[in-house]
Every structure is written in structure tokens, then in C-alpha cells.
Image: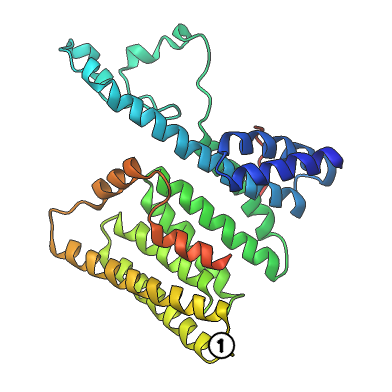
Amino acid sequence: QGRVETFLNEGKKALALGKNEEAVEKLGEASEMVGQKYGQLSIEYADILALYGQALLGNAVQQHSILGNKSLQNASDEMEPAAPAESSKGRFHFEGEPDLAEDEEEEAPEQNGEEEQPDDFETAWEVLDVARVIYSKTEGDEAKLKLGDVLLTLGDVSMESENFEQAATDYTEALTVKQTVLESNDRRLAEAHYKIAISHEYNNQYDPALEHLSEVKKILSERTKSLESEEPSENTKQEIQDMQELIQDIQAKIEDIQNAKQNADTKPEDIWKEQKSENPALPTNVINDLTNLIRSKKPQPAEE
């Protein structure tokens, strides 16, 4: 028990500090121990997997950002004329990405001497999906909220993998689950709506993006009114100010999308890639603001 607590606490601390590689190592060890102690269908196992999945996602974002920068740095070295058969070398290829080379190249897998291992995005998705299955089979409001959080993180994995349609699906399911538990003006619902909006925006679906941003604005406005009716305190005043600033940010975002909708040449996926190159964190500061206001070993797949 002592070793589990040590790995868990060290992993949580590393995750909070953004030391994702260390967090992956510590939480991976802890998840294996917890799985052996409580069973791989236990809520305790799901809880540790949810943290482990977050660490894997964070590490994947960092590593792919580094790989992308290296690819750009070395791009000039790869611009030399090449024979037609070598044309596949001109594209970026990250670890874990499917190999789309010619069949004759695929016929020599032993060239590298070892099989390609799944990257942290894939492992994060698998880990989080195990947690999702466990939470979905657990009764109670707490389990529902945890299920919603895991679905949001699954959506984040899809966003970072640029699978915006799947991200929208996961975020929408998270919102549906959270709505069964939370009050209508809860900031956590605003966070879910915002993430849905962003996933639709980057999938060129402007109307649903605008609809969900309007919901964000509505929730934040209702929350502000609720706070203004309470006894004034320093914390309340600060939160009201935060809400008002967030509403302004959301309105600016709405106007941005309205402008993008009118401009057929705007490609949200290009904006996404540019934002990721400048700041690999997902996907804009507003999500972080909403989130802040609210609050390596691979597991065996759980059976649905």
C-alpha cells in the first residue's frame, strides 16, 4: 500500500507540474499495482487510469511537438531532388502514424529489427477507454461526473490527433452525462459546451459551433447573476470579475467564427495546426480559464 501511495502522489505531483514523462512512469506503476490489488474492473483502477491517461496525453503532446519542430528544422536537408520511388520521404511521419509507403517497402519490416510500438496518443485512448467502461457500469452521481471527465479527456485525445468529428462525439456525450447531475448554470457544463464548439469549428461546422458558444455565454451569464445575488465576499467578487471577462472572451470567439463563416478561404484546420505549433496545449486559453474556475504500463482492455 505504501508503494502505491508513493507512486500515486509522485505521479500526481509530476502531472500538476507538467512533468508528463515522469507522471507517465509513476502513474503507470501505480495503475499496475492498483489493478492487481483491487481488480481491473474496480473504481479505484478507473480513477488511477483517468490520471494515467491525462499524463499519456500530455506527454504525447510534448513529444509530438518536439518531433514536429525537429522535422521542420531538418526540412531543408530533405528538399534535395529524389527519384519518384522515394517520394514518400517528403512527408512528415510521426511515430504511431500509419505507414502509407509503397507495398514493396512494407515487405521488409525486419529492416528496423523491431515492430513499431503504439504512441502515447493511442495508449492514452486505450487507457482512458478502460476507465470509461468502468465508470459507465458504476452507479451514482460521482461516477457519472468521473465518466463525463474521462469522455472530455478522450475528446482531447481526438482533438490532438485532429479527429475533430470523434472529439465532438466524445465531448457531446460528456455534456449529456454531466447534464444529468449538474445544475444548469454549472461552469463545468460551460466547459463541455466550449469544447464541443471548438471541435465543430475545426471541422468547418460553424453553425453548431456558434450554438454551443451561445450556450457557454448563457451559462456564464446565469452564473454571474447567481453570484451577484449572494452575500458579497472577496471570492465572490473575484469570480464575478472572472465570469465577466470570460463572457467577453466568448463573445470575441463568436465574432471570430461568424467572420470565418463568411470567409470561405478560412481553413480552421490550418489555424489549429498553427496554434499547436505556437502552443501545444489544447486548444485555447479560454478552455484553461474555464477549467481553472472549476476546479508506463498498458492496462488490459475492459469488457463492454
Q: Nearer the viewer, residue 294 or 159?
A: 294
Residue 202 to residue 119: above or below:
below
Q: Residue furthest right?
A: 1
Can residue 4 be spotted in the picture? yes
x%, y% of residue 134?
69, 54
Can residue 42 be spotted in the picture? no
x%, y% of residue 152?
52, 57
**Residue that mark 1 sits on:** 232
x%, y% of residue 227?
52, 85
The residue depicted at 51 percent of the width and 73 percent of the height is: 187
Q: Quadrant of residue 261?
A: bottom left
x%, y% of residue 98?
40, 29
The residue depicted at 40 percent of the width and 11 percent of the height is: 107
The residue depicted at 51 percent of the width and 42 percent of the height is: 58
Horizontal arrangement in the rendering, residue 269 relative to residue 68 (left or right):
left
Badge 1 marks a residue whose secondary structure is loop
Q: Quadrant of residue 81?
A: top left
Horizontal arrangement in the rendering, residue 221 relative to residue 35 (left or right):
left
Residue 16 to residue 107: above or below:
below
Horizontal arrangement in the rendering, residue 106 relative to residue 88 (left or right):
right
Q: Amino acid at mark 1?
A: Pro
